[in-house]
Image (spheres, rainbow, N blue to C red):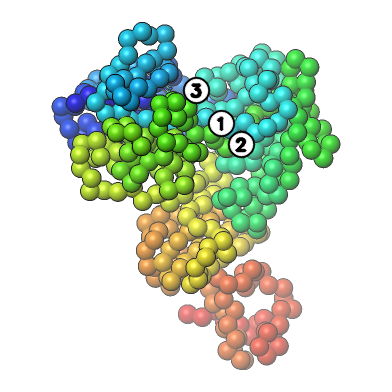
Amino acid sequence: MKVVIIGNNVAGTFTAQNLRSLNEDIEIEVFTQEQYPYYTRIKLPELIPEKVTIDSLIVFKEDWYDAKRINLHLNKKAVNIDPKNKSILFEKEDKPVLYDKLILALGSTPNIPPIKNAREMKDGNRGVFTLRTIDDALQIRDYIEKFDIKKAIVIGGGLLGLELANQLKDTNLETTVVEFFPRLLPRQLDEECGTMLKNEIESRDIKVVLDATTEEILGNGKVSGIKLKDGRIFEAGLILIQAGIRLTIDLAKNAGIETNRGIIVNEFLETSEKDIYAVGDCVEYKNQVWGIIPACMEQSKIVAASIIGSKRVRYEGTTPKNTLKIVGLELTSIGIIDPSKEESGGWEILKKADKEDCCYQKIILKDNKLKGAILFGENKVMSYIYKKMEEDIDQEELRKLLELYIFVCNNCGMEYDEAKMNVLFYDLPADFKCPGCGGSKDNFKKKE
Ligand SMILES: Cc1cc2nc3c(=O)[nH]c(=O)nc-3n(C[C@H](O)[C@H](O)[C@H](O)COP(=O)(O)OP(=O)(O)OC[C@H]3O[C@@H](n4cnc5c(N)ncnc54)[C@H](O)[C@@H]3O)c2cc1C
């Protein structure tokens, strides 16, 4: 059997690896339009200030492919799929490549919002860029050096936008992040934690502008800044757009495969065409798309099993899990973070907000099962949370880990439960009065 995989990043590569470990005999051919073997995108922002080398980003070198007998074809762009004849045509090639099973691991590309001049000025020479590949990072670095850029704007205050802004600042650029929403990371954080994060980012000399719709990129020939919808103008010689992703679907769509935002798959990662599968960022399952590595990894196991004919494991979606990777800034958001948006009841929130120490921990439970968390400034509980997701938890153990206590008034027995209050007990003002008996703060003792 000959399996062809188009796409050689996380999804394509781990599917190839899983296929090989399930079956020694199948022929595995992997094609990618990029010029590098599998590399991680996680550290791409660090390539701009040269904190990492290209070599260090490459996860599997050619000898890995040789050892696994996976044939890797670089610089090959697939331009047409013919499902009837089970063949693929590649750019600048006359002879189609035949397959028995085809896996589309086409990934995604940066989304460009409808901003005047954004597309026109994103040609590599005029100062508008996005970051997705090694070549993008090299282009950005070259542009900064060649034109001695001093100021940058990142459009998009999501995880990638913030990581990128941090690296640009480390390249000695005066950096501003412009965010459309009224707070940072709206999908990963609640309002309170979003404000804490904004303060922390600004304390690192990165300016944050919220509630800001970029209307136009300014510049005659080269970028000179941006204009917001409210008329404000910000100057910069470099604009980086990090405003979400667009799933790569055209190749599939043109072949008659069912698509929506992504390539539509069933629980076995099968597309609407026989013997064609999809995996990774390009996939849409039950109206949901992911764009994160854990989803690629999970799906790559299932698609490999499906190809081999074992349909025991079904894909059920992946719990969203995001971590901000800025040195000295611990921030993780996992699962459900805002139960008010959910239809069912039985939700409980344990929260610890220590603004002085810039620490915020919010744990979401439903019927005592761990459903989600925001952890900012403190990662002691992170491994506990990862391990216990979707499981029943021991609240006492969790409270101990979070250092969340209950204080009891000796006069009237009134309890002050830090997990349910906005202020930690020790942060209450000295003249705090017990809501039960009006007694002083000194009457309270920690409940053992
Ligand atoms: C800077 C950055 C940091 C990130 N950090 C994190 C993180 O910390 N955690 C996390 O979970 N996720 C992170 N992500 C997201 C993560 O990298 C993606 O989820 C992951 O790369 C998706 O893998 P994929 O294989 O599905 O697709 P992609 O990585 O997009 O790879 C698809 C490949 O297919 C190729 N291709 C597409 N069309 C064709 C064609 N017609 N012919 C040939 N080849 C084609 C593409 O060129 C590409 O090389 C980050 C992304 C970026 C850009």
Dot 2 crowding, Cα within 10 Å, few <14, some 14–19, many 20+ = many
Q: Nearer the viewer, mark 2 or mark 3?
A: 2
As shown in the figure, which amino acid type bears the numbered disc 1? Pro
Dot 1 crowding, Cα within 10 Å, few <14, some 14–19, many 20+ = some
Q: Dividing the picture into quarters, in which one does residue 180 lie?
A: top right
- State yes or no: discs 2 and 3 in contact (Cβ < 8 Å): no
The yes-or-no answer for disc 1 within 8 Å of ligand 1 is yes
The yes-or-no answer for disc 2 within 8 Å of ligand 1 is no
Front in this rendered view, residue 44 or 13: 13
Q: Residue at x 71, y 82 (%)?
A: 433
The percent coordinates of residue 258 (x first, y second) are 42, 36
Up the image or down, 285 lies above or below 214; here it is below
Q: Is residue 34 visible?
A: yes
- Left or right, 167 with respect to 66, comes to right
The percent coordinates of residue 402 (x first, y second) are 49, 64
Q: Earlier in the sequence, mark 1 or mark 3?
A: 1
- Left or right, 327 with respect to 423, comes to left
**Residue 134, numbered circle:** 3
- State yes or no: discs 2 and 1 in contact (Cβ < 8 Å): yes
Q: Earlier in the sequence, mark 2 or mark 1?
A: 1
Q: CA distance from mark 1 to mark 3?
A: 14 Å
Front in this rendered view, residue 61 or 431: 61
Q: Secondary structure at mark 1?
A: strand
Q: Is residue 203 visible?
A: no
- State yes or no: discs 1 and 3 in contact (Cβ < 8 Å): no
Q: CA distance from mark 2 to mark 1?
A: 7 Å
Residue on which disc 1 sits: 110
Q: Residue furthest right?
A: 231
Residue on which disc 2 sits: 243
As shown in the figure, which amino acid type bears the numbered disc 3? Ile
As shown in the figure, which amino acid type bears the numbered disc 2? Ala
